[in-house]
Image (tube, rainbow, N blue to C red):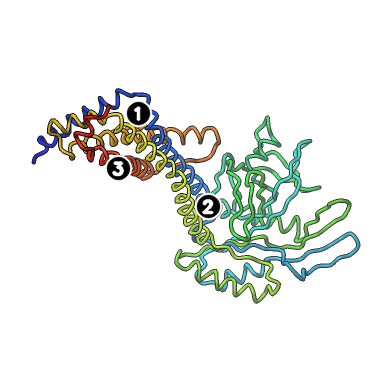
Amino acid sequence: MNYLSWFRIIFPLIRTACQSLLLHKLRSMLTMLGLVFGVASVIIMLAIAEGASYEAQKQIESLGVRNIIVRSTKPVNDVQGTNSGTEFVLAYGLTWDDLDRIRTTLKSAVAATPLREFRQEIRHLNRAIEGRVVGATPEYLDLTSSEIQTGRFLEPVDLSRFQNVCVIGAELAEKLFPFEDPLQKTVRIGPNHFYRIVGVTSYRTPSGGAGSSLSAQDFNRDVYIPVTTDRARFGEMIVYETSGSQSMERIELSQITVQVADREAVRQTARVLNDMLSIFHPKKDFAVTIPLELLEQAEQTQRIFSLLLGSTAGISLLVGGIGIMNIMLATVTERTREIGIRRALGAKRFDIVSQFLIETALLSLTGAMLGAILGLLAPAVISWLSGRTTIITFYAPVIAVIVALIVGTGFGVYPARRAAMLHPIEALRSE
């Protein structure tokens, strides 16, 4: 049987099904609503999950999949320090000697970048805000995937000459210099350290904590100064004043970022690095974080999250299918006499089943397509209202529509079979 013959058979059935559905427009529309919202909710949920995963993975990827991050951490027990009256000195963390050992010992490492950070008041004239002072190198910009909005970042000459220059974050520039260009202006860090601004970084979404050693960070309140200047001007002792008492921390380096040439060697290098540092840090005042592992964990979590949200939204499709079955059963009851007349005129059971299945398929297809349109438009509105990223993947609407068709048509099989199994004489007697 060729395609033309199939068309001649199916087209009258489709036309009859459309006429039957249009006789009860409101009922048909209400029946479709279950699938409309079911398909839309699947697409929207998956778009939200994909957007959340993208943001999380983007933050982790900015740390570098070939990087190993070693952070100074306060030891839990037996802290090395002194307590005298109202002053307490806490000494812990990575040292410059550790940096030298890493550079000379780890053959697989192509770079090791030091970083030191602490919180201080940043002031310009009568405006002040608490920010994070970061002693960094020129490589820091690439390691964190940051961008310069205006001016420049730190350069090698700034480190070699111990220059009093700095690069400030976008929020600091906005708060301290609301009506003027901050370039070449001066900010005061702490009580008596003055630095000339040579650049401003672009706005970055604050990151959430990643791993056991990486806390949440707001890069927009950072002040970047040469790490050599930081060591010379601030020294290794940082003083904090709280509630009339002073506490001091002695920390040489807050972080060392080790970059490995081969991605496959990251884990092995991290184990060697951890073993080496453990020899010189028996109190375990450091933590090793591998962004590659965090990225893989984020991808796995995203798959589970998408499956959970998709399954939750899929319940709406199931409810929509039950609604279609309910309405089609009612339709069979209403059209019992019509079915008897058709059977009496020679219609076979297959013809009756085909008629009701095509009606069900039309309801399912129309509801699925309307739901897909709603699902494709809604994520953009959600992003605009909430400011969150939503991403619609190709497979989300395709899977949602296919599942809706299968569910809707599947739930229509029983009513269609029940209609076909009616005895013609009994059907004709029906009022």
Q: Is residue 420 above or below residue 254?
A: above
Q: Position of residue 77 (x, y in %)?
A: 75, 69
Q: Amino acid at mark 2?
A: Ser
Task: Determine whether, in the image, residue 295 is placed left or right of residue 320.
Answer: right
The one nearer the camera, 256 or 327, is: 327
Q: Which mark is residue 28?
A: 1
Q: Position of residue 18 (x, y in %)?
A: 26, 27
The one nearer the camera, 38 or 272, is: 38
Q: Amino acid at mark 1?
A: Ser
Q: Which mark is residue 62?
A: 2
The one nearer the camera, 269 or 319, is: 319
Q: Measure how far apart labels 1 and 2 are at the Cα level.
A: 51 Å
Disc 2 packing (10 Å; few <14; some 14–19; many ≥20): some
The quadrant in which residue 92 appears is bottom right
The quadrant in which residue 93 appears is bottom right
Quick check: marks 1 and 2 in contact, CB under 8 Å? no
Task: Determine whether, in the image, residue 312 is placed left or right of residue 27.
Answer: right
Q: Is residue 95 above or below residue 36?
A: below
* Element class at badge 3: helix
Q: Which numbered disc, 3 or 1, marks the residue closer to the eye?
A: 3
Q: Amino acid at mark 3?
A: Tyr
Please name the residue shown 72% across and 67% down the image: 75
